[in-house]
Image: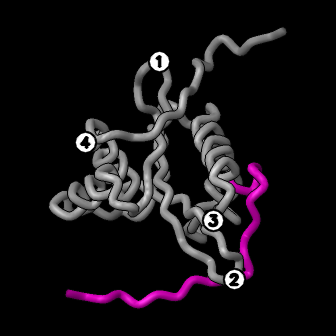
Amino acid sequence: SMTNQNTSEITIRRAIGSDLETIVDFNSAMARETEGKTLDLGRLRPGVAAVLADGGWGFYLLAEIAGQVAGQLMITTEWSDWRNAYFWWIQSVYVIPEHRRRGVYRALDQQVRAQARLRGNVCGVRLYVDRRNHGAQKVYSSLGMCPSHYDMYEVEISE
């Protein structure tokens, strides 16, 4: 069989406490790139740490190539009383630029779906995508995701 020599094997693992700074860096880079936002590290770092401390907020999956972290996503959960099951929300997606278009996100997505099926109490996987981010929309569509019939409304709660 033919193997593609320039794609190293992608392995997926759950993030642990020692991945804190990598995830903080990735989230900072993603916010700059997608929204031109500079995140407040005094908020971001404890926000990531809370997830890694496994307080039930969710979990991160990391994609590694040759021992280096190449991409990430976070899963948070939403309970659906209608379905008596959870929706998993994909958030904080980031793949470092030099590893894009090599199947890193696809590998993360496959692992999310496999873990969701194993849980047995997950009814669907959802994510938000910026209306202007056509590249991401194409990727999600190629993986069989469809736009939902819901629009999101929000109000910011200031402190």
Residues at circles 2 and 1 in contact by the CB criterion of under 8 Å: no
Residue 18's image quarter? top left
Residue 126 - label: 3
Specify the amino acid type for callout 4: Glu
Q: Are marks 1 and 3 in contact (CB under 8 Å)?
A: no
Q: Earlier in the sequence, mark 2 or mark 4?
A: 4
The C terminus is located in which quarter?
bottom left
Cα–Cα gap, marks 1 and 3: 29 Å
| Quadrant location, the N terminus | top right
Counting residues from the start of the chain, the first of labels 1 and 3 encountered is: 1
Tag 1 secondary structure: loop
Marks 3 and 4 in Cβ contact (< 8 Å): no
Residue 103, image x and y in percent? 64, 34
Residue where numbered disc 2 is placed: 82
Separation (CA) of disc 3 from disc 4: 26 Å
Q: Residue at x 32, y 50 (%)?
A: 52
SS of the residue at dot 3?
Answer: strand
Q: Which mark is residue 21?
A: 4
Q: CA distance from mark 2 to mark 4?
A: 38 Å
For this view, does 46 lie left or right of residue 125?
left
